[in-house]
Image (cartoon, coloured by chain):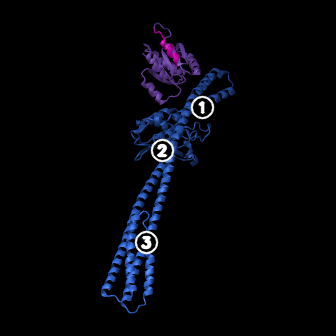
Amino acid sequence: MFKNVNIYYRVTIISICIILLNQFFIQYFLHQKKSDAEIINIGGKQRMISQRLLVLGLLELESSDKGRQSDIDHLYKQWLEAHEFLKEKFAPKGFYGDFQLGIQSQLDGLDVFIIKSKNFISKNVVLSEVDKEAFRKNQDSFLFRMNNIVSAIEVHSSEKLQTVIWVEILFALISLFMIYYEITFIFKKINNNLDNKNKALEDSNHMLEQYAYLAAHDLRSPTQNIINFTKLLKRKLETKMDDKEKTYFSFIYDAAQRMNETTEELLKFASINHDTIEITPCQPKKILDNVIQDLKPKIEERKAQIKIGELPDAIQADQQLIHLVFQNLIANGIKFVQKDKTPELTINYSSQQKKHVFHVQDNGIGINSDNQKKIFGLFKRLHNQQEFKGTGIGLSICQKIVEKHNGMISVESEVNEGSTFTFSLPKNMRN
Amino acid sequence: MKKFKNLVFIDDDKPTNVFHSIILEEADICESSTFFSSPIDALEYFKNLSTEDNPTYPDAIFLDINMPEINGWEFLDQYKQLNIPQSPVIIMLTTSLFPKDLQKAKELEIVHKLINKPLEVENLHELNTELISGSIVH
C-alpha cells in the first residue's frame, strides 16, 4: 500500500517535470525563433544597405556632382555596426557552436568586400570601365555571399524548428503516457479500495448472518423447552387453576410460541446464502400445489379463494426457496384481509424477454404508499399482534431469496383495495 | 399393543430428554428407555452392546442432529463403523425441518425418518404401529 503511494507520488513529480521541461523547450525555441527572425531581418537590411552603397558609389564615381560622401559614410557606418552585431551574435558558443562558427567565418570575409568598395569610392577618381566592372563584380560576390549566409541561417532556423516540433511531440507523448498511467493507477487504487470495502462489507454481512443464524439456532431449543414444559404443566394443572392463572399460563405460552416463530423465521432468513442456493429446473405449478397444501389449514379457516393463471412449464430456480416465496406471499394475502371479507388471491405469470415475472394479487387491506418500500425491511411490521400476528421477517425472506436469484420484488397497492406483489426471476439462471 | 423392548434417545439438551421421557411414559409404548446427553457415551454403549439374549436390546434410536461434540450425522458415520449386526431403526430428530436435512435423511439408507422435535405422543404411537406391525424391527 505504502509502496504504491510512493510510486504514485514519483509518477506525479516526473510528469510535472516533463510538462515543465516541455514548456521550457517550447519557450526557449520560440525565443530562438524570434532571435533567428531578427537576424534574418538584419541580414536583409545589410543586403539593402550594401546595394544602396553600390548605387551611391557608382553615382559618386560617375557623376561630376560629388555630394554623396556623407550619405555613403553614414551607410557604411550603419553597415559596420550591424555587421559587428551579427559577428557578436554568431560567436561560436552554445548548442549550435559549429554552425555559429561557420556563419561567423563567412561574415568575417564580408568586411573585405565592403572595405574594397569604400576604397574605390574614397579614391574619388574617375574610374576606368575595367575598374567599374571590378567594382560591380566585387559587389556581386559580396551580395552572393550575403545571400548564402542569410539562406543558411534560414535553413538552420527551420531545421531547429523541426527538431523542436519532434522533441515537443515526444515530450507530449511521454506526458500523455504518464498521465494515462497515473489515471489508471488512481482508478486502480479507487477500484481496489472499493473492492476492499465491498469485501469488508460482504464479510461483515456474512458475519452478521452467521451471528443471526447461531443466535436463532441456539434460541430454538430453550424456547422449545419453555413451550413444551408450559404445555405439560398446563395439562397437569389445568383442573387446579383458576381463570387468572390460566390467563397467565397462556401469556407464557403465547410469548414462547411467538419467540419460537421469530427464531424459526430468522433462522430461515439467515440460512439463505448464495452458496446454499441450488438452481434446478422446477415446475411452478407443482410448487404452488405444494404451497397450497402446506397452507391448507389457513386457507380453510378463512375460506380463501385462490386462482392460478397460466404458468410456465419449467423455470430455473431453487425450488425450496421459491416455495418459500410463494408461501410467504400467499400466506400474507390470506392474513392481511379484513376479518369480514373472503380472501381472494390471483396468481399470474407474464413472460419478458429475459425474465419470468410472477404476480400475487390479493383483495386485502392494502399498504399505503409511505410503507410500500419499508415492508421488505427485516422485522418491519405495520400492525400490532392483536390485529395481525407475525414476525416481520416473511417479506425480507422473499426479498432475499429473489435477490439471491438476481431478480427483483416489488409491490403495488391501494389501501382497502388490495396489493399485488410482483417478483421476477432471470430466465438464464445458472448455479 | 406390542411394546418396544428398549428405545435409545441421544440428545445433548437435558430438558428435551426429560420432556421426551414424560411423553414416552404417557405414550406407554416401551418396556424400557435409555437416554444419552452425550453422543460419545452413546457410541460407547453401542460398542459394548451384546446382541445375545439381551432383554433390553434397543429397537430404535432417536438421534438429535444438532449436538456440540459430534452432530447426528457424524455420530452416524462412527456408528456405521461399529457394524452392529442387528441395527436398531434410526430416527433423526431436529428442531426445524430444514430442507437440506430432510434431503440428507432421505438419502441415507440407515435413517428411517426425520421427525421435528419435540416428539408428541401421536408420533410415538404412529411409530409403534409402523415399526412393530411392519417387518422393520428385527
Q: Position of residue A356 (x, y in %)?
A: 42, 43
* Crowdedness near tag 1: few (<14), some (14–19) or many (≥20) residues, C-alpha within 10 Å: some
Label 1 sits on residue? A259
Q: Mark 3 lies on which chain?
A: A
Residue B15's place in the image compared with A9, above or below, is above
Q: Are dots 1 and 3 in contact, CB under 8 Å?
A: no
Residue B42 is one of the magenta-drawn residues:
yes
Q: Which residue appears at 57% of the width and 16% of the height?
A: B25
Q: Which badge, 2 or 1, is on the more N-terminal residue?
A: 1
Query: Could you say whether the residue bearing mark 1 is in a helix, strand or loop?
Result: helix
Which chain comes out purple in the rendered image?
B
Q: Are dots 2 and 3 in contact, CB under 8 Å?
A: no
Amino acid type, mark 3: Lys
Please name whichever residue, A18 or A318, is drawn nearer the observer in this view of the structure: A18
Amino acid type, mark 1: Met
Q: Main SS type for the magenta part?
A: helix
Q: Position of residue A69 (x, y in %)?
A: 43, 87
Which chain comes out blue in the rendered image?
A
Dot label at residue A87? 3
Range shown magenta: B39-51
Residue A29 position by quadrant: bottom left
